[in-house]
Amino acid sequence: MNTTTKRRFIFAVLLFGTALGTSAFATPPANLSASDARPHLPFPDNLDLTKCGIPTVLGDEFTGELSGSYGGELQEALVRLYDSHARAEVVGRAWTGSPARALLMVSGPQLSYLLVRVKVGDQEVEGWVPAPYFKRR
């Protein structure tokens, strides 16, 4: 999906939500169906997961927000949270800008992943996100 198409899609989501009298920034459902496609990442992913390191525990101060942006462009308005750094299954999602706490980090040859905890509505959701989608405060 090119940049123009992404912008049109985001605009359509905002417009559709407004037309229905709802906010496009309402709380997203924490869990997704298995049909939620694994998107192509705009940055290099790890080709060999066996070369990724052992998870590192991060301190209590490792807080920030989810950022679905890369290279100055919005890639995911709703950031997907995965079951692992293998991204086999989407376990939740949260809006870009959602406050998050990083619990663990797995370093890979090309890309690191963070296990984050995000409050979605009245529940907390944990999942792995690519490191570029986490902005530390």
Image: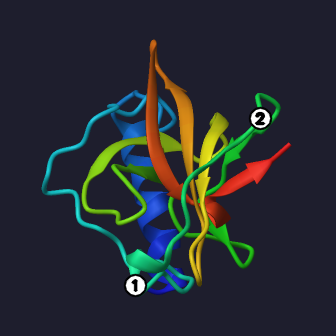
Task: Residue at 22% x, 57% y: name it.
Answer: 36
Relative to 112, 4 lies left or right: left
Mark 2: few/some/many CA within 10 Å (<14, 14-19, 20+)? few
Task: Residue at 50% x, 61% y: name it.
Answer: 76
Mark 1: few/some/many CA within 10 Å (<14, 14-19, 20+)? few
Toward the top, the furthest residue is: 122
Residue 86: x and y, percent? 35, 66
Displayed quadrant of residue 85? bottom left
Q: Nearer the viewer, residue 58 or 34?
A: 58
Q: Nearer the viewer, residue 10 or 126?
A: 126
Q: Which mark is residue 114?
A: none
| Disc 2: which residue | 59
Q: Secondary structure at mark 2?
A: loop
How far apart, in angstroms, are the residues tagged by discs 1 and 2? Answer: 28 Å
Relative to 71, 98 lies left or right: left
Q: Secondary structure at mark 1?
A: loop
Q: Quadrant of the N terminus?
A: bottom left
Q: Quadrant of the C terminus?
A: top right
Q: Amino acid at mark 2?
A: Gly
Q: Nearer the viewer, residue 107 or 10?
A: 107
Query: Tag 2 or tag 1, which sits nearer the N-term?
Result: 1
Q: Marks 2 and 1: in contact by CB < 8 Å?
A: no
Q: Which mark is residue 48?
A: 1
Q: Amino acid at mark 1?
A: Asp
Residue 61: x and y, percent? 82, 32
Displayed quadrant of residue 110? bottom right
Task: Residue at 72% x, 79% y: name it.
Answer: 71
Looking at the image, residue 14 lies above or below residue 59? below
Residue 50: x and y, percent? 40, 76
Toward the right, the furthest residue is: 137
Task: Residue at 24% x, 42% y: name it.
Answer: 32
Residue 59: x and y, percent? 77, 35
